[in-house]
Image (tube, grey):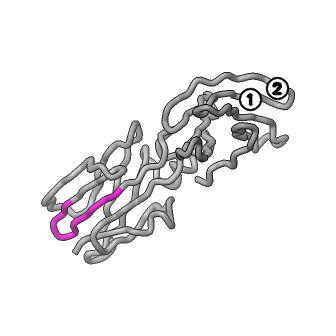
Amino acid sequence: MESSLRNATKYPYVDKVPGSKKQVSIEIEGNTVPNDGIHRVEFEHGTTSGKRVIRADGIEILRRDWMFKLVGREHFNIGKAKCSIIVEAISGFAYEYSLEVNGKPLKKFSENQSKIMKTWTLTVSGEPTRVVLEKDTLDVWVNGQRVESTGEFVDDGTETHFTLGNKSAYIKAISSGNRREGLIHSLIVDDNEIPEAKE
């Protein structure tokens, strides 16, 4: 008997997932690795052989055949993020799988990332593009690469200017008027506001 998860895209922030077939497939949505994009992690668990295979974005990064211990942790890295898949027995040959990123359950890690970063996704010249603003440093990242940017003060806040291919873009920061909410960031590309990504 093997174990599996196929509902990852429906429930991107699931912390624990039961499995009972061949393969666990967890899609890590959102800001899981700072500025690094969306990653898909697949975990194959042979519940009779103990075999464990981890793939990140379709590339095999770990393989263990014939393990006697069917439960436990498997550690791996995605970029600079330290990740762990935890395998726990829940009854008989049923198992529960959870994913941790930098020592935190996936949901908690994603919540923390959304507090320190803003993310927008759009299409530029026919290519999917992901723009990330690190709120503490004001660094701008496009598809995982930090880009040159120039900040300037304007009447109602600040603008951080950069280019997206052949398009001019800037991130505008204005006060929300509410101390708890802080600043409101908006991405403007060719004078059009881009909605924030739902991550």
The location of residue 113, given as percent across then percent down, is 56, 44
Q: Residue 160 falls in which quadrant of the image?
A: top right
- Identified at 80% across, 30% down, the residue is 157
Q: In which quarter of the image is the N terminus?
A: bottom left
Residue 125, disc = none
- Between 98 and 161, the one lying in front of the other is 161
Region in magenta: 42-51
The location of residue 59, given as percent across then percent down, is 29, 49
- Identified at 34% across, 71% down, the residue is 19
For label 2, the crowd category at 10 Å Cα-Cα, with few meaning under 14, some 14 to 19 and many 20 or more, is few
Looking at this view, name the residue that lies furthest to the bottom: 92
Residue 159, disc = 1
Earlier sequence position, callout 1 versus callout 2 = 2
Q: Is residue 134 above or below residue 87?
A: above
**Residue type, label 1:** Glu
Direction from residue 17 to residue 126 in the image, left or right: right
Looking at the rendered structure, the number of numbered marks drawn on it comes to: 2
- Between 59 and 4, the one lying in front of the other is 59
Q: Are marks 1 and 2 in contact (CB under 8 Å)?
A: yes
User: Which element carries disc 2, helix, strand or loop?
Assistant: strand
The location of residue 58, given as percent across then percent down, is 33, 52
Direction from residue 45 to residue 8 in the image, left or right: right
User: Which element carries disc 1, helix, strand or loop?
Assistant: strand
Q: What residue is shown with label 2?
A: 154
The location of residue 42, given as percent across then percent down, is 34, 58
